[in-house]
Image (spheres, helix red, strand yellow):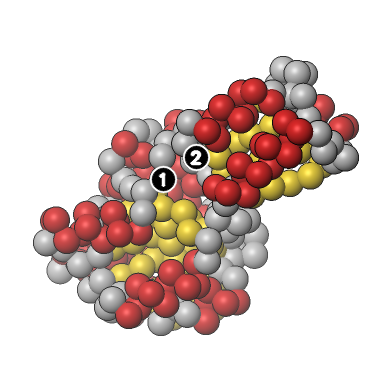
Amino acid sequence: MTIEGRNAVLEAFRSGRTVDKLYVQDGLKDGPILTITREAKKQGTILRFVSKERMDQMSDTGKHQGVIAQAAAYAYAQVEDILKAAEDKGEDPFIFLLDGIEDPHNLGAIIRTANLAGAHGVILPKHRAAGLTPVVARTSAGALNYTPVAKVTNLTATMEDLKKRGMWFVCAAMDGEVMYRLNLTGPIGLVIGNEGSGVSRLVGERCDLTAAIPMKGDIDSLNASVAAGVLAYEVVRQRMGV
């Protein structure tokens, strides 16, 4: 959700609402702007300074007053909430980790797939990724009401922590082992990379396995949300023992 205007943005911060990104017109340094940027830094919001021309292009109302905030349509969960969801069901954790998914339609579709595949939650990085916008909420077809989504500052550090707790990770990549030959059971994290560049190097280095989806067509890649669905249901098949 986009929030424009100094009072509206400041009220969003002070009410405790999750703001993913704050855009501030470059060169503005008056009292209200400094107060807003201070609140943004306190809450760990991504802060971007852009030109007035860019602000005008981004504005829906034309009355942005030098500040535009992108607020989450849904509240984020904590990683602990996701692990607790698995524990409450008596199941090994099954978590989607998304490395730089920037298209909100892809993100919404992946969250929908995660819910239908029985995943216990989704983890997003704070930077270089879509947040829980209204478009994501609509595309998820209601899955955001049931599937917790956590946002973390450092995805690789989160993976290292989860490894210490018994989880292991498989990432999608064209040069990996064919997914049908891999053991995808147990406490697993399915890592899906950016729509264009795939899984980043640092995240890829922390994956235990690399899974490839066999392809027979004339093009060499799948949409990120489709790839997530194909791999997720191989995990489902193996967890069901069929």
Q: Quadrant of the C terminus?
A: bottom left
Residue 234 in the figure: left or right of residue 37: left
Q: Horizontal placement of 101 versus 139: left or right?
A: right
Q: Earlier in the sequence, mark 2 or mark 1?
A: 2
Q: Position of residue 220 (x, y in %)?
A: 60, 65
**Residue at 47% over, 80% down:** 206
Q: Position of residue 70 (x, y in %)?
A: 60, 36
The numbered dot on residue 76 is 1
Q: Residue furthest front?
A: 31
Q: Please count the marks in the image.
A: 2
- Disc 2 crowd, CA 10 A, few/some/many (<14, 14-19, 20+): some
What residue is rendered at 23% in x and 73% in y? Answer: 186
Give the left or right position of residue 211, taking residue 66 as reference. Answer: left
**Quick check: 5 above or below 86?**
above
Percent position of residue 20, x then y = 57, 43
Judge the density around disc 1: few (<14), some (14-19), many (≥20) Cα neighbours within 10 Å. some
Whether pointer 2 and pointer 1 mark residues with C-beta atoms closer than 8 Å, the reply is yes
Q: Separation of disc 2 and disc 1 at Cα?
A: 8 Å
In front: label 2 or label 1: 2
Give residue 25's quadrant in the image.
top right
Task: Tell me residue 42's x, y (percent).
Answer: 58, 49
Q: Amino acid at mark 2?
A: Thr
At a point 62% along the width and 49% down the height, the residue shown is 41
Quarter holding the N terminus is top right
Task: Identify the amino acid type marked 1.
Answer: Tyr
Say if residue 233 shows up in the picture: no
Camera-side residue: 170 or 69? 69
Give the SS element for disc 1. loop
Q: Is residue 235 visible?
A: yes
Q: Which residue is mark 2?
A: 18
Residue at horizontal 49 percent and vertical 47 percent from the top: 107
Up/down of 74 relative to 172, above or below = above
